[in-house]
Image (cartoon, rainbow, N blue to C red):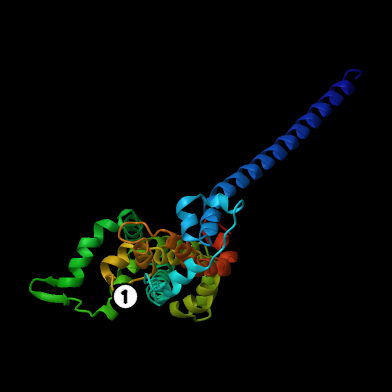
Amino acid sequence: MTTATPTVGAGTQAVGKTTTAGRVRKRLNTRAATLISIVIALLWTIPTFGLFVSSFRPENQIKSTGWWTFFSDPQFTLENYQEVLFGSSSSSGQLASYFINSLAITIPSVLFPLAFASLAAYALAWINFRGRDWLYIAIFAMQIVPLQMALVPLLKFFSTGVTVGGITLMPAWDLVDEQKFAQVWFAHTCFALPFAVFLLHNFISQLPKDLMEAARVDGATHPKIFRTIVLPLITPALAAFGIFQFLWVWNDLLVALIFAGGGDETAPLTVRLAEMAGTRGNEWQRLTAGAFVSIVVPLIVFLSLQRYFVRGLLAGSVKG
């Protein structure tokens, strides 16, 4: 009995030291993670900040000195933005006119995959039919198909149509320039659907089963359940995918250049940005201003939907 008390005291001290060490280690880990995050944020932000500063510098300063010399010899001008947006006597910028083309391409290319993928995800999650699991696996596997591999088949599909056994299932798309947006919508929708279905299916499949059964008991059909119950609950996932798709389509150059052409009637913002440096690449001071003009709309979209972003990324990752 006389030796029990020291033993308990020693054990208590050991537990206290372990708890204290754990707290110190946790604080150090938290501080280290915070420090690493700050360093990564600085490394990511400094080039963008340098581009922003360069967009307000005169052409001769941009081509002769680095952006950091702005603080020792500040020279400020809006000529770069004026030339990019409205053009000048020596060059044709007029980037503002290409905003409409980019919006005409991007908005439908976001809405179509959202509509089709949400319907498909609901069917794969809550409607029992033969081959459902295999169909979901096939859709998931389509994510590994690179976009570049499908450019030639898509071009052939648009130019010749689909004919099987002498029967024309899909006629050729003989479109004028103003109607070529449909080809870009089709291409972006096709390549967005696999990821969209995968993301939305993971979210919809985790919805409470009791909620669905209660709706069926009340006489609700699948369209009504989807419209009144599922859609309001999957808003975070829809917003998360909408942000990804909007940024991807808005910044795309390859698909829009191939299927819409490079004409002024259909060319998006990215096509014009690629041409602004000139034939020899010596007019790249326009790109500094053009880059910030092009990110205005994506930045507005991201900031307006950011409260759904993290919730949408975590959609379907845990149950309950």
Residue 120, by quadrant, is bottom left
Horizontal and vertical percent position of residue 142: 32, 57
Q: Is residue 245 visible?
A: yes
Residue found at x 79% / y 26%: 14
- State whether residue 115 appears in this view: no
Q: In x, y percent, where is residue 249?
A: 39, 66
Name the foreground residue: 214 vs 178.
178
The residue under the point 59% across, 48% down is 42
Q: Position of residue 116 (x, y in %)?
A: 38, 72
- Image quadrant in which the C terminus is located: bottom right
> Which amino acid does the dot numbered 1 rest on?
Thr
Dot 1, crowdedness within 10 Å: few (<14), some or many (≥20)?
A: many
Q: Residue at x 36, y 67 (%)?
A: 272
* Left or right side of 58 for 158: left
Q: Is residue 130 left or right of residue 205?
A: left
Q: Residue furthest top?
A: 3
Residue for badge 1: 266
Q: Residue at x 52, y 60 (%)?
A: 57
Give 247 or 131, whichever is nearer the viewer: 247
The residue tagged with tag 1: helix, strand or loop? loop
How far from the left and from the top, in percent, is residue 199? 45, 61
